[in-house]
Amino acid sequence: MFDMISALDDAFLNLTSLESIKREFYQSRMRQGESVTNFWTRLGSCLGQWSCRYPQEYASIDPEKERRVMFWEGLLTEVRNPLGYLYDDPTVSCQTLFRKAREQQELMQAERKRCEAYRQNIARPAGKPQYPARRFDAKPSMQKLMTKRSTPEETVDPEASEDEGSDPPP
């Protein structure tokens, strides 16, 4: 009895029209933050529903070609643009296009992480070094020269100005 109810529910309760399946498939776009793999799977799910529920209509299309076109059209521009040469080549399969798009997205994510790490290092507050300070070992005579501060008297030599024959200030 339970199997019969389950079969009837599957047949009549979960009705999805052909038009709604086609609309979902043909209007699918990759969402911001969505992976290429998830987008690929969503397209495949739509095609799977189409083939199971409406096999006569599904037989009239070329699923590989349709999936390739809709996958390409739905990709985010940042993923799609570097791969334009692949889509223009009709010998490139749908699977190859998917694989290259996934690789492109992984490259972009790695680049974003690298840039973010660089920005965090630049934005580090003053006084907090990125790396621990190293101890400077200098000879005592060098330390004395490095810590000695010059005074105004040391920088101006009064005898040098008189020797040049300049007039004394009034």
Image: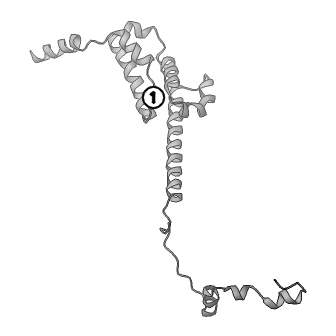
| Residue nearest the viewer, comparing 90 with 84 | 84
- Measured from the top left, where is residue 3 in percent x and y? 14, 17
Count of numbered circles in the view? 1
Q: Is residue 105 above or below residue 121?
A: above
Residue drawn at 53 percent across, 55 percent down: 118
Question: For this view, does 53 lie left or right of residue 86?
Answer: left
- Measured from the top left, where is residue 112 in percent x and y? 51, 46
Residue drawn at 32 percent across, 10 percent down: 17
Amino acid at pointer 1 = Met
Question: For this view, does 75 lie left or right of residue 169?
Answer: left
- Measured from the top left, where is residue 135 in percent x and y? 53, 81
Indicate the quadrant containing the C terminus: top left, top right, bottom left or bottom right: bottom right
Colour mapping used in the image: one colour
Question: For this view, does 3 lie left or right of residue 143?
Answer: left
Q: Quadrant of residue 4?
A: top left
Q: Is residue 125 above or below residue 164?
A: above
- Measured from the top left, where is residue 37 in percent x and y? 43, 33
Circle 1 — which element? loop
The residue at which mark 1 appears reads as 30
Q: Is residue 10 above or below residue 84?
A: above
Circle 1 packing at 10 Å, graded few (<14), some (14-19), many (20+), is: many
The furthest residue to the left: 1
Q: Quadrant of residue 32?
A: top left
Q: Is residue 80 above or below residue 131?
A: above
The furthest residue to the bottom: 141
Residue drawn at 87 percent across, 84 percent down: 167
The furthest residue to the right: 165
Indicate the quadrant containing the N terminus: top left, top right, bottom left or bottom right: top left
| Residue nearest the viewer, comparing 106 with 152 | 152
